[in-house]
Amino acid sequence: MPDVVVTGGPPIRIGIVGCSEIGWRRMLPALAGHADVQVAAVASRTGTRAERFAARFECEAVVGYESLLQREDLDAVYVGLPNALHSRWAGMALAAGLHVLCEKPVSASHSEAEALARHASERGLVLMENFAFVHHVQTMSMVGHIAKGAVGQVQSIDATFGIPARAAGDVRMRPELGGGAVRDLAPYPIRAARLVLGDALNLDGVSRHLDPDHKVDARGSVLLSSDGGGEARCSFGFGYSYRNSLTVWGDGGQLLLEPAFTSRQDQPVTLSWSDDTSAWSNSATDDAFSNLVTTFAQTVQTAHEADAHRRDIVVQADLLERVCRWPA
């Protein structure tokens, strides 16, 4: 894992908007354990969940998200609410003068994402989307190998993220909260396609299968292409045996990253390469969430790459909106 860079300045005081599963398992441990961050408070709608989080992470429990944003002892917030609430509360946090680290997707609307990015830019605030896998050492290694010609000319990408079926009460099965596999899982393989092929991608096809009981997308696939000739098939869904992987196939070889999107700190991620005559593989552990927090903290403290992070959100939202509107 890359060394955490300590700036020597005061820690970034962060508030937690929402008590999510991913927050409990991954984001809060990464934030609370970072030398440049101080978790000051956590908010939930009723307070019960906030008290549980606050006891574990040694911070203050707050009832109501508005109350959290009104505090004067915060520099930033992490928004970990259901998908449909991300853009609203990210926008309210920006309006309160706070830097924002938000769960994906920040928005599934290009115009909405543009407005948030513009607001953040005008106020000199960081707005960053939580794609931790981009910061894993093996993901960065894959991108580096591709840039050096390890697979030759990239011809196709196969990015897959499938998880077991969700329980009926799961937030991801509630359409009014932005549930469904398109918003919950598809952003990962789409982001991976952008990482390899670049941001100028054409949307060539979308397949979506509706869960008839819950009225959300249960599974699907997205076909993307670049003007340079590379293609990407992004498959995702609920109701599968667990799998997430990324294969990049070119005219000179292929690279496989597995697991691609959700590794634990103690879980090795394997990067494999092969061509017609030789092959190699290596496995490495890393804490992608800690690396993400490092990037966020350094961006808040130095403004380095702030424009790039805001632009990432807009590009991602544009692609996701096109997927949601297909075939319009």
Image (cartoon, rainbow, N blue to C red):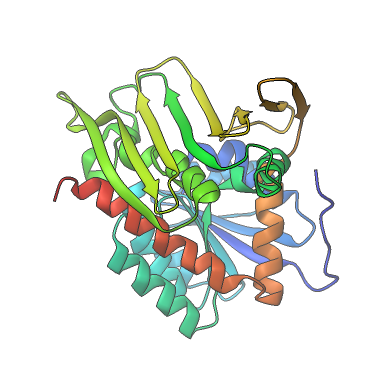
Residue ID at (34%, 53%): 319
Residue 252, percent from left and from top = 62, 33
Is residue 188 visible from the viewing direction of this image? yes
Instruction: Determine the image quadrant of residue 181.
Output: top left
Report the number of numbered marks. 0
**Up-down relation of residue 263 to residue 33 (above or below):** above
Instruction: Determine the image quadrant of residue 126.
Output: bottom right
Residue ID at (35%, 18%): 239
Is residue 64 visible from the viewing direction of this image? no
Residue ID at (53%, 73%): 98
**Up-down relation of residue 197 to residue 314 (above or below):** above
Please indicate whether residue 260 sits to the left or right of residue 57 in the image. Answer: left
Q: Farthest residue to the top: give it.
A: 241
Q: Pick the residue in front: 142 or 85.
A: 142
Residue 306, percent from left and from top = 58, 72
Q: Pick the residue in front: 58 or 250.
A: 250
